[in-house]
Image (cartoon, rainbow, N blue to C red):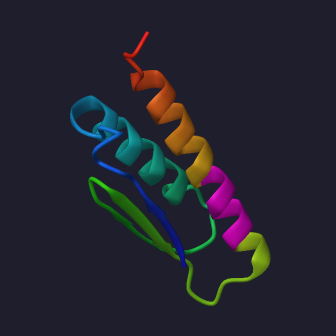
Amino acid sequence: MLTFEFDTETIDISGSTEQLRQYQMQRFAKRSSTPDRNVSIGRDQIVIEVPGSDGTAINRWGNTAVSIIDRTLYSSDTSS
């Protein structure tokens, strides 16, 4: 199981940022080459359960989730 948690006091994932994150995670999950999983996406947490997983499946999901989160937060950064 992979769990990513966000500190809602420092990171705001709402509105279009939340929609983009959900869209990208769902798009990756629907690929036929993506390892089977159960994905739960909340405002401050993403939980990915990969039943019967091996190291390759966990690594693939972990790397993709980090990439999606990074891209989503970078795209929505309004601090500059």
Among all residues in the image, which is located at the extreme left?
15
Q: Which range of residues does the magenta coloring cover?
A: 58-64
Vertical placement of residue 64 versus 50, above or below: above
Image side of residue 29 versus residue 34, left or right: left
Let me know if residue 23 appears in the view: yes
Let me know if residue 33 appears in the view: no
Image quarter hosting the N terminus: bottom right
Residue at the (56%, 86%) spot, across then down: 51
Q: Nearer the viewer, residue 77 or 22?
A: 77
Vertical placement of residue 59 versus 75, above or below: below
Number of residue marks: 0
Image side of residue 57 versus residue 46, left or right: right
Coordinates of residue 20 in the picture (x, y in percent): 37, 36
Residue at the (57%, 55%) spot, across then down: 31
Residue at the (44%, 9%) spot, across then down: 80
Instruction: Tell me the chief SS of the magenta region.
Output: helix
Coordinates of residue 19 in the picture (x, y in percent): 29, 39
